[in-house]
Every structure is written in structure tokens, then in C-alpha cells.
Amino acid sequence: MNGYLAGCHGKTRFTSRRAARRRARQIRGTGGPAFHTYRCPYCHAVHLGHHRGHATHLRTGPHGPIPVQEYAA
């Protein structure tokens, strides 16, 4: 898997941090997780992501995402 697929593919692309922050507040307001915004090094758009240490899954499974609860460290 290349960096683009791991970091960008399938994520919503926002044209500005303001729009991304607004969406993050909407998600948080409906009981969802807290997200942070970041500029993607591959598509140069803004994405939403989990804060470090708060991911719900890892992207390194041969058969798709592995939930953190099932990951044997």
C-alpha cells in the first residue's frame, strides 16, 4: 500500500480548514469523536483525523482495517 492510499484515499477533502473545523464540530455535537484538521501532503486538501493515540483502527491489516481493540501489541 502506498502513502496516498494509506493517508488520503477514501477521506473527505475540504477546501479550507474553516469548513473542516465546522464539520468536526458537527460530528462532535452529535456524539461523535473529536477530530483535528490537517493538510494532506498528497492531495493538498484538508482532512479530518483522530488526535494522536485516539484512533479507532489501524490501517495495516492484509484484509482491511484492524480495530484497535483487536490489535495485539
Image: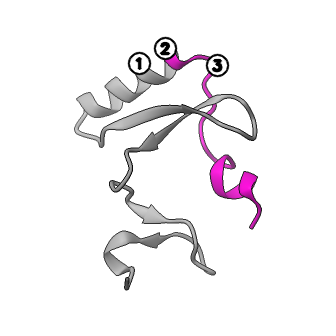
Which circle, 1 or 2, is nearer the viewer? Answer: 2
Q: Which residue is mark 3?
A: 15
Residue 32 drawn in magenta: no
Which class describes the residues within 10 Å of circle 2: few (<14), some (14-19), or many (20+)?
A: few
In this picture, residue 41 sits left or right of residue 25: right
Q: What residue is shown at x 41% (from left), y 34% (from top)?
A: 36
Q: Amino acid type of disc 2?
A: Arg
- Outermost bottom residue: 72
Give percent across and percent down for residue 53: 34, 56
Front one among 2 and 32:
2
State yes or no: discs 1 and 2 in contact (Cβ < 8 Å): yes
Dot 1: element: helix
Range covered by the magenta-colored residues: 1-18
Q: Which mark is residue 11?
A: none
Q: Which residue is mark 1?
A: 22
Q: Which residue is mark 2?
A: 18
Q: What residue is shown at x 24% (from left), y 28% (from top)?
A: 29
Q: Is residue 19 above or below residue 2?
A: above
Front one among 51 and 33:
51
Residue 16 drawn in magenta: yes
Q: Amino acid type of disc 1?
A: Arg
Q: Amino acid type of disc 3?
A: Thr
Dot 2: element: helix
Q: Is residue 12 above or below residue 7?
A: above
Give percent across and percent down for residue 18: 49, 14
- Mark 1 and mark 3 lie on one chain; the one further toward the N terminus is 3
Give percent across and percent down for residue 61: 57, 77
> Where does the C terminus fall, quadrant-wise?
bottom left
> Where does the N terminus fall, quadrant-wise?
bottom right
